[in-house]
Amino acid sequence: MPCERCGASLDRTAAASHECDPERLAEYQMFGMRHEIAGFEKRLRDYLDRAHGRFEVWLAAHHVRRKT
Ligand SMILES: [Zn+2]
């Protein structure tokens, strides 16, 4: 049966004394979260696009106010 935290395959006797290898644990959790990570990167890009758009609007308004 696999360890539910790190995915290592364990037999019943090893399971009780098993301690997850930190490197394997990190890789397994990253693998499990890969869709969320990909989604996060997309949301971050969307956010930055919007933030950039807002800055452009602010900058344009700022220039307009300075001229008047
Ligand atoms: Zn484990």
Image (cartoon, rainbow, N blue to C red):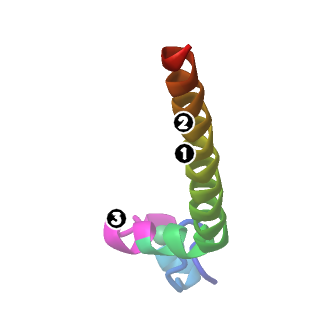
Query: At 55% across and 78% down in the image, what residue appears?
Result: 7
Circle 2 residue: 55
Return the residue nearer the eye: 26 or 63.
Answer: 63
CA gap, disc 3 and disc 2: 42 Å
Q: Are marks 2 and 1 in contact (CB under 8 Å)?
A: yes
CA gap, disc 2 and disc 1: 5 Å
**50 versus 12 height, above or below:** above
Circle 3 residue: 22
> Does residue 43 appear left or right of residue 27 in this picture?
right
- Asked whether residue 23 is drawn in magenta, I would say yes
Residue 65, quarter of the rendered image: top right
- Disc 2 under 8 Å from ligand 1? The reply is no
What span is in magenta? 16-26
How far across and down, in percent of the image, does residue 39 sit? Answer: 66, 64
Circle 1 residue: 52
How far across and down, in percent of the image, does residue 63 sit? Answer: 50, 26
How far across and down, in percent of the image, does residue 13 sit? Answer: 51, 78
Three-letter amino acid code at the position of disc 1: His
The reply to whether residue 62 is visible in this rendering is yes
CA gap, disc 1 and disc 3: 38 Å
Three-letter amino acid code at the position of disc 2: Phe
Label 1 crowding class (10 Å Cα cut-off): few <14, some 14-19, many 20+? few
- Disc 1 under 8 Å from ligand 1? The reply is no
Label 3 crowding class (10 Å Cα cut-off): few <14, some 14-19, many 20+? few
**Image quadrant where one finds the C terminus:** top right
Q: Mark 1 or mark 3, which is nearer to you?
A: 1
Q: Are marks 1 and 3 in contact (CB under 8 Å)?
A: no
Residue 25 is tagged as none
* Circle 3 SS class: helix
